[in-house]
């Protein structure tokens, strides 16, 4: 397979030089490392591809929680560099690093007090340079959060702005004499913030903040502010970052009589940002965090002149509810309402992320009744206010975890994985909502889960030590050594997905099935192969914990013998009439068909 | 050029006599002669197509007849030889006449003809359904009911469908075309949503999930379903309603949405066909009449219900509208856009006096449709229970009853969320409950009458 856009799929040696498979390992091991052989040394190339993000698998990680390189108990950017070989082996294409800027950490680092440097415990700017370079050498790109709607109140800009009404930055934030303006605009963190306005005794005025009161909103009406933000963008792109996740992108501007979200001025600024980036920095990505209904989110793609990617938020709770209800409509419903992104644009889809609580608070419940049901479902409600990782959320059920990942990897969009979920890592609900899912990455059964050489007492958060998810058994080393591990399974699946670009940018057609527990859809590749036929893969999923049978309408492929992707076994030829399939509990098939 | 009508009629009569549905439909007119009412040639040439309308006694039937040269027929009718009527001659040519709907090419032509040239399709497949009509799916996007048993005037189903569509009620499988001739509705073409599923299937999925918990050693029943440790049988029995509510496959939210859709349906029926005050004495008579097949205690209870209903003042009993009349979980479908109402009064589930006839249009209280749907929950629950092993029966029955309670309530609550629908209901919720109970008993009796011995 010589697709230049996929780069050269060579695999680096595993950490420690251990063979990747036990002797006589899984019979399909060789086959699955297409087109190369396991254990061959080499590096992946960074694809020179303007549209790399359309086919990329993203990996979200918390810098403080990944790996500690200097023994202070806190993960750092250099630590990420040391683990790039692992990430390259896993097969991810782009790292998404959560904010590493200096911050008082009252909002997980999203309260930034200096845009031009790095929090000291994480490293410094030269570490970012090195991270980007080393990642690129392994064919991995790096993006980070760009928090542009607001800053921390500890930021020098705000200190200056609040100091008087006529300093140079007086107008850099949104000040008002009273708190009555824009009273229709909802309060996002309504549990903790009574209003979007907070009184500042220093300036004797109110300032506007869509989020916490210690995160004053920047005033985008002020061209200096817009220019300052663009300078930040340029700075980090010069450092070498491959793009940004634009946090809270919907809220930049305010206007009387509006919801303060998705305003035309906001789109205009994003398009301006995009224009500058396209002009001076090729092959970068802007990924917008806009928690809206998909038909509204597409506005952030513009005419392919705004953001390259947007997260698809409603899909995630629906995937969980579909498995819970054992029927497919939660998913098929949202798929039929999800527009195809414009050319050059792509959805970002995910199973978990770091920030679900925000989702609950901002989702329009009337439009997404499924989210309301997810939040009120008795089992989910136990978890409300406590963020859970994937594995505990599915009660560590391996089959369900595989099924959900199969959906994630085969539905349209670029998948975003959360660090540690490849190990089915657990969480620690007693640490409070955010920290519970940011415990140290579990590398080995050694001290501190191999995360840090510091004393246990110094660790920024304790690693998990319970009998089910404790690091003694759940760690990368165990995942490597156990050929049946979920880690190996996921790595294989990512390799398979990479081999079939249609998973990334192909069309989607949901197929009818007479069994509500069976979800079937076909992904069809955009272009014809050398035989003139279009490649197609049929994905059949059993959402039930019981074995199921269904009949699918595959008339178009009459005469074709489907081939299962993972094992390459031939399935019965498609005849006239319904095609019967039987599926074990929570199992799935990816069946290659020729498209007609 | 077409074969002579008389020879076709003779062949058709013989052919029909061999069809089970025809024999049922003409059971009480067995001695009456068959008369040709109309023979319309729709396509000349080979293959050709004609429509015969035949009459026997009071009933009329439609048969679409196709013909081909004998040597072409084998290829087309391979495997469908039972559709052959016989040989005919036309201008010296030997032709084979057959039921046209067995011929794909002709069937595709029928679609085009029936829609006045508006629709064309490339593929057709036959769906086996009930027999008063042939059911055909074209290109997986159009559905045609080609009626075999004809009815005078407008078929209620078609009338309702087009009227609702006209006034903008969109929770329907949209009507596309109606084919009429000789004073009869001959076929209905409507949209087809292949991914839509009968409500009954969703209900069975929900029940399967719930009843699996009745099995004390069901390891698969413990499933992930995001629950740490499944409730034991004891825990379940202790609070069965809670356990039912917490089941992963809980259907309540879907029933809630169905309730809201039903309310909109009733409002649309009221808008489309009018409404007037409900008549308590008539309703009481219907309820009282259902005692006939009940056992003694049930009959007494039913009589009391009827008396209470009869005692209602006019104006206390809500409004009377054109009801759906056959509203149950097989008549609603879940599609990607939500719930749809499919099927009005045609091929009713329950026995009627005249086989293969539509339920006539009927006015009544909207509560009758609600009672039908509530009763339908019990029917599906019984179906699911029948599939469980007998050893679980007690707990499983309790779970099934709890499931019915929960979903009934969700459905009625969903119905009530559409505020305008209150004007169709009795002003007192207690009266609505009374009517509901009465009509559920009527349904119960009717169900037993239809399926006793089943």
Image (tube, coloured by chain):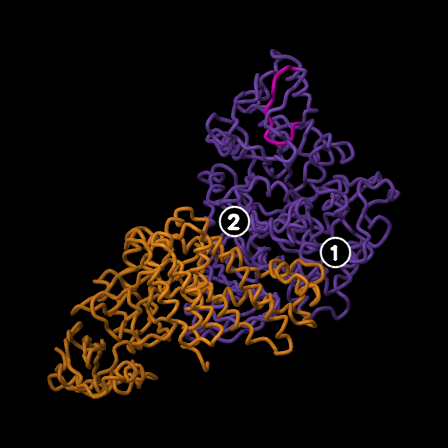
Chain colours: A purple, B orange
The residue singled out by tag 1 in the image is: A13
- How many marks the image carries: the answer is 2
Identify the mark at residue A369; answer none if there is no mark. Answer: 2
On screen, residue A458 above or below A576 = above
Near-viewer residue (B227 or A571):
B227
Is A369 in front, or is A103? A369
| Vertical placement of residue B158 versus A187, above or below | below
Q: Are marks 2 and 1 on the same chain?
A: yes
Does the stretch in magenta take in A207? yes
- Residue B1 is situated, as x and y percent measured from the top left of the image, at 12, 77
- The vertical placement of B143 against A63, above or below, is below
Task: Give the image quarter of residue A170.
Answer: top right
Task: Give the chain of mark 1.
Answer: A
Quarter of image, res B329: bottom left
Q: SS at mark 1?
A: loop
The residue positioned 61% from the left and 78% from the top of the image is B389
Label pair 2/1, CB-CB below 8 angstroms: no
Q: Residues within 10 Å of mark 1 (few under 14, many from 20)?
A: many
The span shown in magenta is: A203-213
Mark drawn on residue B158? none
Dot 2, how many residues are within 10 Å of its Cα: few (below 14), some (14-19), or many (20+)? some
User: x, y percentage for residue B273?
Assistant: 28, 55
Q: Position of residue A482 (x, y in %)?
A: 76, 63
């Amino acid at each position: 397979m010589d697709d230049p856009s996929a780069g050269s799929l060579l695999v680096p040696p595993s950490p420690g030089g251990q063979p990747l498979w036990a002797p006589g390992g899984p019979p399909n091991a060789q086959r699955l490392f297409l087109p190369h052989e396991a254990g061959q040394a080499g590096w992946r190339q960074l694809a020179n591809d303007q549209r790399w993000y359309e086919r990329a698998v993203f990996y979200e990680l918390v810098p403080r929680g990944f790996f500690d390189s200097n023994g202070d108990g806190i993960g750092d950017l250099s630590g990420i560099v040391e683990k790039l070989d692992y990430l390259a082996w896993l097969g991810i294409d782009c790292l998404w690093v959560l904010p590493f800027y200096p911050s008082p950490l009252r909002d997980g680092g999203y309260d930034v007090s200096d845009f031009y440097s790095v929090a000291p415990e994480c490293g410094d700017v030269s570490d970012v340079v090195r991270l980007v370079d080393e990642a690129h050498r392994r064919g991995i790109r790096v993006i980070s959060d760009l928090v542009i709607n607001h800053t921390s109140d500890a930021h020098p800009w705000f200190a200056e702005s609040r100091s008087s009404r006529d300093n140079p930055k007086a107008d850099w934030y949104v000040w008002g004499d009273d708190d009555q303006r824009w009273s229709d605009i909802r309060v996002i963190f309504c549990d903790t913030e009574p209003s979007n306005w907070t009184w500042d005794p220093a300036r004797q005025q109110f300032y506007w903040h869509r989020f916490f009161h210690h995160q004053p909103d920047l005033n985008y009406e002020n061209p200096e502010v817009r220019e300052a933000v663009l300078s930040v963008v340029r700075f980090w792109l010069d450092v070498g970052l491959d793009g940004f996740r634009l946090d809270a992108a919907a809220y930049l501007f305010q206007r009387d009589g509006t919801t303060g979200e998705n305003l035309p001025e906001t789109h205009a600024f994003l398009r301006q940002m995009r224009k500058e980036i396209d002009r001076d920095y090729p092959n970068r990505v802007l990924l917008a965090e806009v928690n809206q209904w998909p038909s509204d989110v597409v506005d952030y793609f513009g005419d392919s002149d705004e953001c390259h990617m947007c997260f698809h938020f409603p899909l995630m709770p629906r995937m969980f509810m579909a498995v819970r209800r054992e029927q497919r409509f939660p998913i098929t419903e949202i798929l039929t309402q999800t527009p195809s992104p414009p050319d050059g644009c792509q959805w970002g889809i995910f199973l978990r992320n770091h920030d679900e609580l925000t989702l609950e608070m901002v989702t329009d419940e009337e439009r997404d009744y499924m989210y309301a049901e997810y939040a009120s479902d008795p089992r989910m409600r136990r978890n409300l206010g406590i963020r859970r990782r994937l594995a505990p959320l599915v009660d560590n059920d391996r089959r369900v975890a595989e099924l959900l990942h199969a959906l994630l990897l085969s539905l349209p969009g670029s998948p975003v994985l959360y660090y540690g979920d490849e190990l089915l890592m657990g969480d620690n609900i007693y640490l409070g909502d955010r920290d519970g899912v940011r415990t140290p990455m579990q590398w080995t059964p050694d001290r501190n889960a191999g995360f840090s050489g510091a004393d246990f007492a110094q660790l920024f958060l304790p690693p998990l030590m319970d009998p089910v998810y404790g690091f003694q058994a759940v760690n990368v080393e165990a995942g490597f050594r156990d050929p049946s591990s979920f880690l190996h399974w996921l790595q294989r699946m990512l390799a398979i997905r990479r081999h079939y670009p249609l998973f990334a940018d192909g069309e989607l057609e949901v197929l009818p099935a007479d069994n509500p527990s069976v979800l079937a859809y076909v992904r069809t590749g955009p272009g014809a192969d050398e035989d003139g036929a279009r490649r197609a893969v049929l994905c059949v999923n059993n959402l039930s914990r019981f074995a199921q049978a269904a009949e699918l309408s595959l008339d178009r492929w009459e005469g074709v013998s489907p081939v299962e992707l993972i094992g390459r076994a031939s399935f019965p030829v498609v005849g006239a009439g319904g095609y019967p399939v039987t599926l074990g509990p929570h199992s799935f098939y990816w069946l290659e068909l020729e498209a007609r | 050029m077409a074969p002579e009508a008389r020879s076709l009629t003779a062949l058709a009569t013989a052919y029909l006599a061999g069809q089970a549905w025809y024999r049922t439909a003409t059971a009480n007119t067995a001695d009456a002669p068959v008369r040709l009412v109309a023979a319309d040639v729709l396509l000349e040439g080979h293959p050709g197509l004609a429509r015969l309308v035949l009459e026997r006694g009071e009933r009329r039937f439609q048969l679409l007849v196709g013909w081909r040269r004998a040597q072409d027929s084998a290829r087309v009718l391979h495997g469908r030889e039972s559709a052959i009527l016989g040989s005919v001659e036309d201008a010296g040519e030997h032709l084979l006449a057959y039921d046209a709907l067995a011929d794909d090419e002709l069937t595709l032509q029928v679609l085009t003809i029936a829609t006045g040239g508006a629709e064309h399709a490339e593929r057709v497949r036959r769906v086996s359904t009930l027999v008063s009509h042939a059911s055909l799916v074209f290109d997986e996007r159009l559905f045609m009911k080609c009626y075999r048993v004809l009815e005078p005037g407008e078929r209620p189903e078609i009338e309702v469908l087009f009227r609702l569509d006209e006034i903008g009620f969109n929770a329907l499988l949209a009507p596309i075309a109606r084919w009429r001739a000789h004073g009869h509705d001959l076929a209905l073409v409507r949209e087809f949503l292949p991914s839509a599923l009968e409500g009954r299937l969703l209900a069975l999925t929900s029940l399967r999930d719930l009843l699996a918990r009745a099995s004390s050693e069901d390891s698969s029943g413990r499933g992930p379903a995001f629950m740490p440790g499944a409730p034991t049988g004891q825990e379940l029995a202790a609070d069965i309603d809670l356990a039912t509510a917490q089941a992963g496959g809980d259907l309540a939210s879907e029933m809630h949405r169905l309730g809201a859709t039903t309310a909109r349906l009733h409002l649309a029926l009221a808008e489309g066909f009018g409404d007037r005050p409900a008549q308590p004495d008539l309703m009481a008579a219907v309820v009282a009449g259902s005692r006939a097949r009940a056992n003694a205690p049930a009959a007494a209870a039913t009589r009391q219900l009827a008396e209470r209903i009869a005692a209602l003042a006019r104006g206390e009993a809500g409004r009377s509208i054109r009801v759906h009349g056959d509203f149950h979980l097989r008549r609603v479908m879940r599609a990607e856009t939500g719930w749809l109402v499919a099927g009005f009064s045609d091929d009713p589930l329950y026995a009627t006096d005249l086989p293969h006839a539509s339920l006539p249009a009927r006015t009544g209280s909207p509560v009758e449709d609600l009672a039908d749907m509530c009763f339908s929950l019990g029917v599906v629950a019984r179906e699911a229970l029948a599939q469980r092993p007998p050893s679980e029966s007690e707990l499983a029955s309790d779970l099934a009853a709890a499931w019915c309670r929960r979903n009934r309530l969700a459905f009625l609550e969903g119905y009530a969320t559409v505020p305008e629908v209150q004007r169709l209901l009795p002003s007192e919720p207690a009266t609505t409950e009374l009517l509901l109970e009465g009509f559920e008993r009527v349904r119960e009796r009717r169900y037993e009458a239809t399926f006793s011995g089943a």
